[in-house]
Amino acid sequence: MDFIDVVKENVMDSFQRVGVNIEIDVWTSIELLPMNCFDWSRRQYFSPCIINWLYSRLAINLPEYFIVGIGYIDAYDTGLNFVFGEAFPRLRTCVVYTKRLNPSFYGEKTDYNLYVERISKEIVHELGHLLGLGHCNNPRCVMSFSNSIYDVDAKSRFYCSNCAYSIKRKLV
Ligand code: ZN
Ligand code: ZN
């Protein structure tokens, strides 16, 4: 199975756990990123620029759709050294940046399962933001804020009961 299919099943499973069935359409086209979003001094992409660009690139604005981008790049936002992902609820768009989710970024050996699990968690997290959720104090909850890759690994792929309740109220 392709990596994106595993990610898709994981994300759907996290929502099924809450009692919500979501549909995911995968577009596997690879987009050439706009260089005006690249900060040459930091050698990172500026995340808000990427999200705005993805939104304008796809130009979808259907109330029942969210746009989720996955990019093998490193990105930051103002005041943060880096971000694993970011969501703009107003645009119904989020992006997950996978470079720092890859074990090889930390000099560790390739671990496909770990990499896919981390990407899945961050997508479920950003979708939570798109659904209006904030960060959660429960370190096992997928909505807990991750400062480092250790935080990502410490949390589960699932919403805690409080966050699950909020998701359900939005979607059911
Ligand atoms: Zn967050
Ligand atoms: Zn929670």
Image: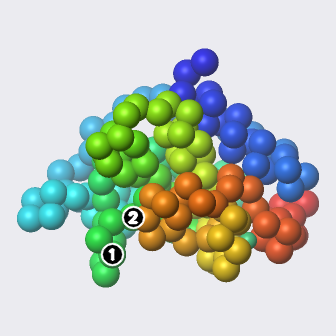
Which kind of residue does numbered mark 1 sit on?
A: Leu
Q: Residue at x 40, y 31 (%)?
A: 110
Asked whether 141 or 34 is in front, the reply is: 141
Quadrant housing the C terminus: bottom right
Q: Determine whether 35 is above or below 24 in the image.
A: below
Q: Secondary structure at mark 2?
A: loop
Q: Secondary structure at mark 1?
A: loop
Q: Position of residue 143 (x, y in %)?
A: 65, 67
Q: Residue at x 29, y 43 (%)?
A: 107
Q: Which residue is mark 2?
A: 83
Which kind of residue does numbered mark 2 sit on?
A: Val
Quadrant housing the N terminus: top right
Asked whether 158 or 106 is in front, the reply is: 106
Q: Which residue is mark 1?
A: 80
Asked whether 17 or 62 is in front, the reply is: 17
Residues at circles 1 and 2 in contact by the CB criterion of under 8 Å: yes
Q: Residue at x 25, y 58 (%)?
A: 45
